[in-house]
């Protein structure tokens, strides 16, 4: 069991297991990625986002 809280994408319940106890589907980590000022790949992400918006 991991120490991070997880969320089911189907019924939006929170738990600590890798599968939802209600529907049995896999859960995902509920927290966003950690922010860093020294982001090495930020320029590439911004270019991809601008290209997708066009």
Image (spheres, helix red, strand yellow):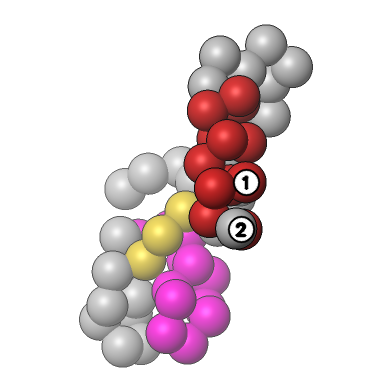
Q: Left or right: where does residue 15 sit relative to residue 26?
A: right
Residue at image position (44%, 76%) is 9
Which residue is found at the position 30% from the left and 60% from the top? 18
> Is 14 above or below relative to 4?
below
- Horizontally, residue 14 falls left or right of residue 22, namely right
Tag 2 near tag 1, CB within 8 Å: yes
Residue 50 is marked as 1
The one nearer the camera, 4 or 8, is 8
Residue ID at (61%, 24%): 43
* Secondary element type, mark 2: helix
Count neighbours of disc 1 (C-alpha within 10 A) and say few if under 14, some if 14 to 19, many if 20 or more.
few
For the residues marked 2 and 1, what is the alpha-carbon distance in whole angstroms? 5 Å
Q: Is residue 24 magenta?
A: no
Quadrant position of residue 54: bottom right
Percent across and percent down for residue 42 are 61, 26
Residues in magenta?
6-17
User: Quarter of the image holding residue 40?
Assistant: top right
Q: Residue 53: give its label.
A: 2
Answer yes or no: is residue 5 visible. no
Name the element at disc 1.
Answer: helix
Tell me residue 28's x, y (percent). Answer: 41, 60
Q: Nearer the viewer, residue 27 or 50?
A: 50
Specify whether residue 7 is in view. yes
Q: Residue at x 61, y 58 (%)?
A: 53
């Amino acid at each position: 069991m991991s120490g991070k809280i997880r969320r089911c994408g189907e019924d939006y319940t929170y738990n600590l297991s890798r599968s939802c106890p209600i529907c049995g589907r896999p859960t995902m980590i509920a927290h966003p990625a950690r922010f860093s000022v020294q982001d090495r790949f930020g320029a590439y992400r911004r270019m991809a986002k601008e290209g997708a918006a066009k």
